[in-house]
Amino acid sequence: MSEGIAVGIDLGTSNSCVCIAEGDRPTVIPNEWGETVHASVVSFLEGGAVLVGNEAKRRMADDPRNTISSAKRIIGRYFFSEEVKRARERMPYEIVEAENHGVRIVVRDQLYAVPEISALVLKEMKELASTHLARPVTHAVITCPAYFNDNQRQATRDAARLAGLEVLRIINEPTAAALAYGYGRGLSQKVAVYDLGGGTFDISILELGDDVFEVLSTAGDTYLGGDDYDDRIVDRLVREFRDSTGLDLTQNRWCLHRLKEAAERAKIELSQREEVEIFVPQLCKDPSGKVLDLRSRLTRREFAEMVLDLTQRTFKVCDEALQSARLTAKDIDAVVLVGGSTRMPAIQQAVAHYFGKAPLGNIDPDHVVAVGAAIHARELMGKGGGKTVLLDVTPLPLRVATVGGFAETILEKNTPVPIERSKIFTTSRDNQEKVRIEVLQGESSLASECESLGAFEFSGFRKAGRGEVEIEVVFEIDTNGIVNVTARDRDTGQQASTTIHLSSGLTAEEIEQKASRIQSTPLARRQAG
Amino acid sequence: MDAAFRIEVETLARILDQLDYFQVLELEPDATPAQIKAAYHRKSRVFHPDRFLQVAGAELRAQILAIHKRITEAYTVLREEERRRAYAAAVTGPERERHLRWTVQEGEGPGPEEVGTTEKGRKLYGAALLDLEAGRLDAAERNLKMALVFEPGNPHYARKAEEVAALRKASLQAGNLSST
């Protein structure tokens, strides 16, 4: 049994949450202001300190260039990816390209890798927990969307290491939620976890048994989240404002940010009320210098119609997951909602309609993932009594690039992990010394449409005629969903040496350097008043 | 952890490469899907590496991980009815040793001999594969369409035709349409 203190951390696109499981009940840890949900926003102050959380979010309008939000949208992504392209258009902070198609964020003349931003959020969570418990937190289970690929998972793990946390596990958010729901209750059910976060949508189908929770399938859309719902309101406000004043608010990032804040607020209020008034005072000036306000109204019904297609998109993904699990919606015994966006009545009604039963009402969608992560952390520390075994799956097919631009499947999606599968390659030239394999993850059978996890070059084979050396390449996916690739001569068992090309991740040296920078960065506290 | 379990792990890890998947899961070759799933759960309860994260001894943990990975591997192969049958046949055959573990075969899936039911279809499919290798996408697509005329609904032909169509679309988008 390890003596460290372990927490569960839900590292979200918009919000994060930290929880500890000790004694009977898991405790969601509040900050000094009693808040349990913290914006995943990092504001770099003058003088070197950073402010993290809801107070940092308030600085987004005043200091947009030095206040970083939604880093999770681009974590583990290549510079040329669609997500990074989008972020560069929309985000007020500066994003530049680094070596090997990597991504850096420029803040106050310094370059930060994306995991460093997430590391600062994690550092804040760690600090909150350490202060609350009056003991230093050492270990953590960190959650990520089920649909995250290997690059994104590695980057998430790097972030935790940078924050000085020992990573017990990277666990899928829906799986954590299912654990929080079913742990220790002796259920025998098929459960759907519908997880609409700020930036991503995940659905997982699980079979909960007495002491084994098996994920049957998972599916997701990494381009769909609560933010897209806000954007629909923003679009409408922009249109209304243009119609009445002729001014285009999209040209000004500060204006857009104010609209976005107002839209999010309206969305949240619509969960409580049938109609909201939207008022953004002193939004901009017209050409004559007159200061203009924005006023609008929005009903729950109008909003539901505006976002109908977004909600329908989530059910396409649900269809896919159910089909993979060889189930239909009526086989599901319980539906767990995760993510603040699922508070929207339009979504709750649509989910109830789709599954033919109301989603469970007594679960806090903002806390449930962190609670599950904390329960798992306790188990992994050997303090949970070994009550539940989690059997998770890999969300995406693992492939290798082949001749003609194709991507051949090695491990299908929804294969349980940890697992390994090997493929035999034979040499195609006499005295061939090297074999190069590009490893991919993605749904498409075209290599160009998959995510590259890197090109592995194996060398050090014995010299022989073509076709005489059989090289066994072993592809392994571990319990974190992280991929390892090794190769050996099939006859001699000789392990090949490996070089990895094209990988945007951080090297061991970079992690060490950046860890000392992150750990020495002081966290600013919010002042009263 | 008791001594008996430690010995069980060490023994199992040592002979793992000689066991077939039925032996790994302690099942009969004609086990039903429900029995296969139950065995996977039962074995996972005993050998899941999560339960031993804090147990001293890196070697022992590595052995447990290897065993659990093999349990998962056995489950993923045996739970597919078609694979289970093919596997059961392979491990009772003369080349048992070579077939104990499911590996991905080299090449682009099954050849024409294995997938075609008519001679014309096989010929056209074979030609399409050659066209594909040479980058003649138009010709490959034509041949696959013809193959499907002779064998409507052949899933291998249909899948390949889809692949080629996707490839053509991609190459059209890239603006380097190959000539035929």
Image: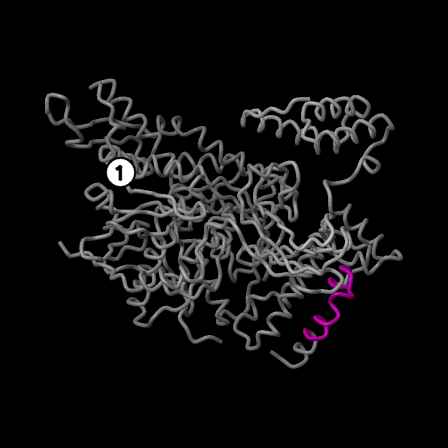
Q: Where's the C terminus of chain A, which quadrant?
A: bottom left
- In the rendered image, the residue lying farthest to the right is B94
- Nearest the eye: A457 or A519: A457
Quadrant of residue A8 within the rendered picture? bottom left
Q: Which chain carries label 1?
A: A
Q: Is the magenta stretch mostly helix, strand or loop?
A: helix
Q: In this view, does A496 lie above or below A67?
A: below
Start and end of the magenta stretch? B9-25
Q: What residue type is labelled 1?
A: Glu
| Residue under the image location 62 percent in, 26 percent down | B168
Q: Is mark 1 on a helix, strand or loop?
A: helix
| Residue under the image location 38 percent in, 61 percent down | A162
Classed neighbour count for the residue bearing mark 1: other residues with Cα under 10 Å, few (<14), some (14–19), many (≥20):
some
Magenta-drawn stretch contains B14: yes
The answer to whether residue B28 shows anywhere in this view is: yes
All told, the count of numbered labels is 1
Q: Residue A500: give x, y in percent of width and height.
A: 54, 54
Q: In this view, does A499 lie to the left or right of B147?
A: left
Task: From the image, tell me which residue sits under label 1.
Answer: A261
- Nearest the eye: A354 or A522: A522
The answer to whether residue A206 shows anywhere in this view is: no
Q: Residue A110: give x, y in percent of width and height.
A: 28, 52
Q: Is residue A83 left or right of residue A462?
A: left
Q: Residue A304: give x, y in percent of width and height.
A: 39, 29
Quadrant of residue B99 within the rendered picture? bottom right
Q: Residue A154: give x, y in percent of width and height.
A: 48, 55
Q: Is residue A490 left or right of residue A123?
A: right
Q: Is residue A473 above or below residue B139?
A: below
| Residue under the image location 31 percent in, 51 percent down | A111
Magenta-drawn stretch contains B82: no
